[in-house]
Amino acid sequence: MPKDDMPKKFPKIVIDALAEDNGHNEEAILLVEAMRKERESTLYSDLIFTLTHLHFKEHEARHHWEEILKHKVAMSLDLKRNVGVRVAILDYFTNMHQKIDNPKIIELDLYEQTLLSSVTDGLTGLYNHRFFHDRLEEETERARRYKTPLSVVLYDIDDFKVYNDTNGHIAGDVLLLEASKLIRKTVRRSDIPSRYGGDEMGIILPHTDKAGAYIISDRIRERVYSHHFPNQEILPLGQVSMSGGVATFPMDAADKTTLIEAADHALYQSKESGKNRVIQFNPLFQESESKHPAPKAKTARAPRARKKAKK
């Protein structure tokens, strides 16, 4: 899982440099400038979130940070010693702006480990279902505000039940873990890979149009298909494969919910078309399903009921 994605961690040297706590440090200056370029629209909101777990819009976060630095200087003059930025930020949000009512002291590394465990799936190490939805909500609003594309891909491991029932649940868990490792190795640092439920994976692809999303998602499919899993020969295709569906905001959907539904329809089409493929959403899918409903023995499928991920 790309760790720099949640929350975006700032090395201590960078926090000190931004707070002007470590004097003129060439390494810190270079790191700060690199982060300014990488996180142009989220630098200060990421920084304050790292230190306080408080969410602010970027312009609000920058204003608070500038006020915190002023407050740090004033406290240092009053106490006649250098006051670290952590002390200043605690006093600022506890006593001046009362954003923190009951502060607790905890090592940042321990806090991050605790926070990470609450948003990741225990088996695969991917983000969990809840985080996927929370983050997709944020990314959709960001894409709407800045008029940038946002894509989602949903995957389903083909014939997973056959593999699980034949080889046993432990082997099934190993398959999920290995497939998840391949996904993490293939996605970009900005992507958000998640275990959506059971044998389903979902990936949020910020700043990615439909063509780009297809390239990335099919690369992941191919990487899983070319990997050797134990006793995969018992599967109908002779090896482990995944089917995927891609949808893009705002081309295919107006909000988070319809974006997931569109990706789910595309996933269904990839299953119906023979599996082991990625299909991009096409609104004709839905029209075809509504005009030509399947017989009762094979009821037409709305977005499927989701299986809960194993913890």
Image (cartoon, rainbow, N blue to C red):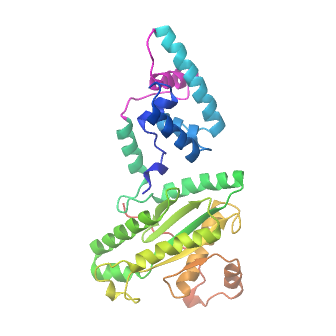
* Quadrant in the picture for the C terminus: bottom left
**Residue at the location (64% across, 34% down)?**
60
Q: Is residue 101 magenta?
A: yes
Tell me the residue at 43%/75% (across/down): 223
Choose top left, top right, bottom left or bottom right for residue 180: bottom left
Query: Which residue: 27% across, 71% down?
Result: 170
Give the residue at the far front of this rendering: 26
Q: Is residue 4 above or below residue 104?
A: below
Task: Answer above or below: position of 172 versus 235.
Answer: above
Q: Does residue 303 appear in the picture of this structure?
A: no
In percent of width and height, residue 215 lies at 56, 72
Q: Is residue 253 left or right of residue 134?
A: right
| Quarter in which the N terminus is drawn | bottom left
Instruction: From the top left corner, tell me how far across and down residue 6 is, in percent.
Output: 47, 49
| Residue 289 in view (yes/no) | yes
Q: Which residues are magenta?
A: 80-107
- Image coordinates of residue 162 in percent, x first then y, are 36, 83
Does the segment drawn in magenta span residue 41?
no
Q: Is residue 118 above or below residue 104?
A: below
- Residue 252: percent from the left, percent from the top? 69, 69
